[in-house]
Image (cartoon, helix red, strand yellow):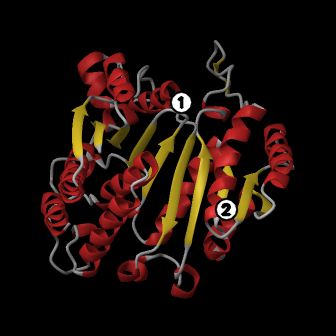
Amino acid sequence: MEMNIALLPGDGIGPEVIAQAVKVVKAVGKKFGHTINFEEAAVGAAAIDLTGNPYPDATHEVCLRADAVLFGAIGDPKYDNDPKAKVRPEQGLLEMRKKLGLFANIRPTFTFPSLIHKSPLKLERVEGVDFVFFRELTGGIYFGEPRGRNEQGTKAFDTNVYTKEEITRLARMGFEAAQKRRKLLTCVDKANVLATSRLWRETVQELAPEYPDVKVEYEFVDAVAMRLIQWPKAYDVLITENLFGDILTDEASVISGSMGLMPSASVGTENKLFEPIHGSYPQAAGKDIANPLATVLSAAMMFEYAFDLKAEAQAISDVVNKSLSEGIVTEDIAEGAKAYKTSEVGDWLAENL
């Protein structure tokens, strides 16, 4: 198979971790006989520095030409520390999702046997955890209008808007995923307070009879925030709106013991993007110490979700688990043992594939 992959390294440690994922993807191509073409483009603060735009038209064209997008990270302290900055790297991420139609963020949470002791939760709570969030990406308070501040600067406002169509397409993805897993779907909302959440709940209730094999539960977002820590094994597939999903998936990500281990996908009808869930970690940029495993596992998700190549995805997952069990890891999880450089981990993974 021939694959065209857009590379968006982005900011901070993004270029370093993307470089390791490329090594692994090339090794998979060689192992399984695929032809893989890469095309790189700028995004985030790197793109602002080059063009003044965090998601330039040229980058968008690269993404449209690709079969899948492999993305690093966005964010830079010089913008984070300037509340009056008119252009921000994160605006590029929102614009990219919107223009590519990436309406669903898929965020799995699972544990690694060799690292389970690093979880902040007790062993009996976290062992065997395996759930996945489907977060709606292009609606809600991040995109609703009107938004802004009054002329005096004393009042600010954001508008939370959802349509039935936006909810339906995300919910169907969740139902279909649940059918392939443990057949349990949890709709996360705040229907006791918010009109948009009531629309979410009503829409999911209308869809549920089409999936009679899936058990559906409805929980308020604050209860889920609590239960993710108390009983994380109680969940299988969770669906929710943009803001709630943004917060809950970051909470869930630390259950495994390290944010540097969790991959994600953002998918739409036509386009698919894959990225690690960690940020740009600017303090580590250029030091060759960042953990590349989340980006490598995002590449595994790419093979599965973009190309339906499960053997290739499993080969990557297996070699990552081998690296963890044999201690071929970066300093964030080395625990006093030898710590390998980012580039050394990437080389080892590629060689051992």
Pick the front one: 107 or 210: 210
Reply above or below: 146 against 217. above
* Of 288 and 268, the residue lying toward us: 268
Callout 1: helix, strand or loop?
Answer: loop
Identify residue type, mark 1. Gly
Quarter occupied by residue 344: bottom left
Horizontal and vertical percent position of residue 135: 60, 47
Up-down: is 84 above or below 273?
A: above
Q: Secondary structure at mark 2?
A: helix
Which residue corresponds to the image point at 65% horizontal and 70% vertical from the top-left?
182
- The answer for how far apart the CA atoms under marks 1 and 2 are is 25 Å
Q: Position of residue 79 (x, y in %)?
A: 36, 31
Instruction: Left or right? Give the position of 266 relative to 260.
Output: right
Residue placed most toward the observer, 165 or 75: 165
Q: Is residue 329 left or right of residue 224?
A: left
Three-letter amino acid code of the residue under disc 2: Gln
User: Residue at horizontal 52%, vertical 55%?
Assistant: 107
Q: Quadrant of residue 195?
A: top right
The answer to whether residue 229 is above or below residue 293 is: below
In this rendering, which labeled residue sits more in front, label 1 or label 2?
Answer: 2
What residue sits 75% from the left and 63% below the top? 214
Q: Is residue 21 above or below residue 96?
A: below
Residue beneath disc 2: 179
Label at residue 101:
1
Query: Residue 245 got which mark?
Result: none
Quadrant of the snapshot with the C terminus: bottom left
Q: Residues within 10 Å of mark 2 (few under 14, many from 20)?
A: some
Q: Earlier in the sequence, mark 1 or mark 2?
A: 1
Image quarter in which the N terminus is found: top left
- Residue 146 position, x and y percent, is 69, 19
Q: Can the viewer see residue 73?
A: no
